[in-house]
Amino acid sequence: MTLSPKLQLAHRVGGSLAVKSLPALYGVGLVLLVVRALPKSDFGQYGMAIAYMNVVAGLSRGLWTMPLVIHAAKGEREHLLAPSFWLSMGTAVVGGLIGMILLPLLHVSDELALFTAIILLVLVPRDIAIALAQASGRVWVAFAIEAGYFMGSLSGFIALTLVSQLRTAEAVMIMNLASAGLSALIGLGFEPCLMHPGTRGDWKGIFHLGRWIGMHALGEIFLQQGDALLVGIFFAPEAIAPYIAARTLLRMYTLLSQSVNFLVLPSASRLGASNQIRLLRRRLRTVLEYLEGMLLAVNVVMWFAAPVIFPLVLGVKYIPAIPFFRLLIFASFLEPVYSILANAVAGIGKPSRILPVLASALLFNVVGNLILLPLVGLWSAPVVLVLTYAILATAMVWLARRQLVERAAVLPALQG
């Protein structure tokens, strides 16, 4: 039975929200089980290891899997499949080796660094399979693959809790590793071609497009978690644990924009290819209006409820995280504006336009943290992050308006 266009859209949106509900459930389990159970030193180490893993994996997705999404959405998946797979694997190998050197310098255990390196390798087939599902609109396939990781990890945390073994960062990371393996197996089940990806493809083309999207993806994931590595330079894992706990809760906010971006990138690619720029602009405006309204209601409640929620959910040892969280709330209004508009601009084939905006904001973030953290202390980190997102959101509104308006104005002339 063929669904109507409205039902097809509802199906895709519902599936996308379901996909992004999985990391939300995982986040709840992480907060209720892992954050409460681990000593602050172990949670600080785990937070830095996961942050590093996500930065490397995010860079790889931007460089090699997002170009695959864009081309596969146009029916050209075979052009980039092999380059995407092998370049992702190479990035995982290099990132893992660097992590085994860098993370111990930040007081992360050698075992935790090794597990992080292995997970990076295991995630490659899983990420490629999700990219292919995203490009073809098979959101429920993506849901099944993601469920292997997030629900598998959550089940592992519950099991460790029941047998009183959720005590170390290494135990938590082992659950992440096992679940990454399960997710990869599910992905291979849906995309068996990844067991023999071949070597032919548009290697030059993936570099051309991926270099811009890769910087965009790296910037996004760094802004979400990278400052955990910067604060680790100056403070011990135990000291930064409250800040990482507050950042963990904030990352759950970004799932809203990520669920939208799951559809925005391929949708913008298709609408751009069919010259429907005005329709794209209307959809972006509507999505942002709904998101900001939802965030306003949620954040008002969270601001006043934080003194009750944090001791109840995280335990009294994380009461110092409340002021960090209240500052970070302001970033939650700015992140969707930047993230969604940046994905739209990338989707219409203009990822290079994003790079100056992102590079400037990242430079501000890194330099600001490196200067202020030793002078002011940990309190400077959330302030620098909010200001960074303010720069990104303001610049991206200007850039998206210019790119989408110019594209819409040029198309009638070209068609005539």
Image: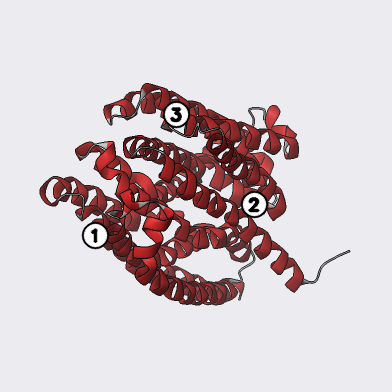
Label 3, secondary structure: give it: helix
Q: In this view, does 42 lie above or below 10?
A: above
Which of disc 1 and disc 3 is earlier in sequence? Answer: 3
Please tell me which residue is depicted at 48% across the width and 63% down the height of the picture. 340
Please give the residue where the numbered disc 2 appears in the rendered image: 134
Q: In this view, does 349 lie above or below 142?
A: below
Between 385 and 21, the residue placed more toward the observer is: 21
What amino acid is found at the position of numbered circle 2 in the picture? Gln
Whole-number angstrom distance, CA of label 3 to CA of label 1: 31 Å
- Is residue 185 visible in the rendered structure shown here? yes
User: Dot 3: few (<14), some (14–19), or many (≥20) neighbours within 10 Å?
Assistant: many
User: Dot 1: few (<14), some (14–19), or many (≥20) neighbours within 10 Å?
Assistant: some
User: Dot 2: few (<14), some (14–19), or many (≥20) neighbours within 10 Å?
Assistant: many
Q: Residue 170 carries which label?
A: 3
Between 322 and 81, the residue placed more toward the observer is: 322
Coloring applied to the structure? secondary structure
Label 2, secondary structure: give it: helix
Q: Quadrant of residue 24?
A: bottom right
Whole-number angstrom distance, CA of label 2 to CA of label 1: 35 Å
* Closer to viewer: mark 3 or mark 1: 3
- Is residue 80 visible in the rendered structure shown here? no
Which of disc 1 and disc 2 is earlier in sequence? Answer: 2
What is the number of callouts on the image?
3
Q: In which quarter of the image is residue 260?
A: bottom right
Give the percent coordinates (x, y) of residue 92.
48, 30
Whole-number angstrom distance, CA of label 3 to CA of label 2: 32 Å
